[in-house]
Every structure is written in C-alpha cells, then in structure tokens.
Image (cartoon, helix red, strand yellow):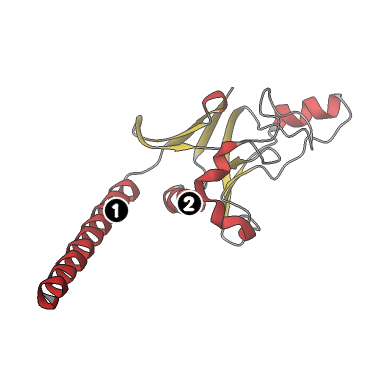
C-alpha cells in the first residue's frame, strides 16, 4: 500500500517537473524568436490601453498598459497627469530607475515645448515606459486595473523586462488617443 502511494506520488512529481520543463523551453523559444526580430516601432492606443510592438510592419507582441491618471487628451503641461500623444522616439534606457527598468520617451518635442511656452507653463518631461515602483513589484498585472502614473506608460515588471531586451534606443513610438 505504502509503495503504491509513494510510486504514485513520484509519478505526479515527475509529470509536474516535465510540464515545467516543457513550459520553460517554449517560453525560452518564444523570447528567442521575438528578440531575433528587429523592432521597427511601437504603437500605443491610449483608449484601448494597448501597446503594440512592430517588426517589418507585423505585430510581434501586444501589451495591456496603465497610463497617466488623467489619460484623456494630449499632455500639455507638467503635472497634468496626461500621457502624450504624437510621434516620439525611445531616447534612453535606464536599468537603475526607481521604477523597474524604463525606456525614455522623447517628450517634449518642439511642438510640445512651443505650446507650453505660449501658455507660460512648463511642458514637463521624464515620460517613460516602465514597470512598477521598486517597492510594489508584487502587484504584477494588477497595476493595469486603473491609470496611476504621472503621464508614463506602465507595464508589469515581467513585461518591461521582455520589452527592454528588444527595444533599441531610437525606436519610433506613435501614441494615439
């Protein structure tokens, strides 16, 4: 009796280990395939909370995102809680951010600065695609439940790690309403 229970227990452990091993291989192959493709552009649809990654005019990855705390409308001024809209570039990568990794967005551009100057207000800056604040990594994908950034685009930590690996500085990013 004990031998049968022990044997069954060992079989279940082996099956679980095999499933984990196979899932790891598929995950590795997926990441290898995605990283082998050169990313041409990123497209964000704010109203859908969606970030699309393009290579050779084909979508290779999709992410759900959280945005600035007041996401409707274009960012005009520092502190307005809005996420920018328009054509920008990834202008830097920071592995030592107070948020888990970040990809810098070239906001403000010349039009953004001119608009803010005409209204005698600062345009702001430091708009990023980033993960969770370093002390809140346990939230994972729950962070998408509401828009909480100051104008940035937020992903889970595992998602920003994946994106960070495949996005070179200079990548075009289009942000639509």
In-image side of 123 versus 126 (left or right): right
Say which of 163 and 17 sits in front: 17
Inter-mark Cα distance, 2 to 1: 17 Å
Image quarter where the N terminus lies is bottom left
Task: State which tag comes first along the sequence, 2 or 1.
Answer: 1
Quadrant in which residue 86 is drawn: top right
SS class, disc 1: helix
| Position of residue 23 measured from the top left corner of the image (x, y, whole percent) | 25, 55
On residue 158, the disc is: none
Q: Residue at x 61, y 36 (%)?
A: 146
Q: Is residue 158 above or below residue 10?
A: above
Q: Residue furthest right?
A: 120
Left of 148 or right of it: where is 39? left
Residue beneath label 1, please? 27
Give the x, y percent position of residue 28: 28, 56
Secondary structure of the residue carrying numbered label 2:
helix
Q: Residues within 10 Å of mark 2 (few under 14, many from 20)?
A: some
Q: Crowding near pointer 1: few (<14 within 10 Å), some, many (20+)?
A: few
Q: Which mark is residue 164?
A: 2
Question: Vertical placement of 72 versus 32: above or below?
Answer: above
Residue 92 or residue 141, whichever sits in front? 141
What residue appears at the point 22 percent right and 62 percent down from the top-left corner?
A: 16
């Amino acid at each position: 009796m004990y031998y049968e229970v022990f044997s069954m227990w060992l079989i279940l452990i082996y099956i679980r280990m095999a499933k984990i091993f196979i899932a790891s291989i598929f995950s590795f192959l997926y990441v290898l395939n995605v990283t082998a493709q050169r990313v041409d552009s990123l497209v964000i649809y704010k109203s859908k909370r969606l970030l699309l990654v393009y290579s050779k005019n084909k979508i290779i990855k999709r992410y759900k995102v959280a945005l600035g705390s007041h996401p409707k409308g274009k960012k005009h001024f520092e502190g307005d809680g809005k996420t920018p809209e328009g054509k920008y570039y990834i202008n830097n990568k920071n592995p030592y951010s107070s948020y888990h990794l970040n990809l810098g967005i070239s906001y403000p551009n010349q039009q953004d600065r001119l608009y803010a100057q005409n209204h005698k207000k600062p345009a702001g800056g430091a708009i990023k695609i980033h993960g969770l604040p370093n002390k809140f990594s346990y939230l994972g994908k729950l962070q998408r439940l509401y828009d909480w950034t100051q104008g940035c685009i937020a992903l889970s930590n595992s998602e920003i790690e994946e994106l960070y690996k495949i996005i070179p500085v200079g990548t075009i990013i289009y942000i639509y309403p």
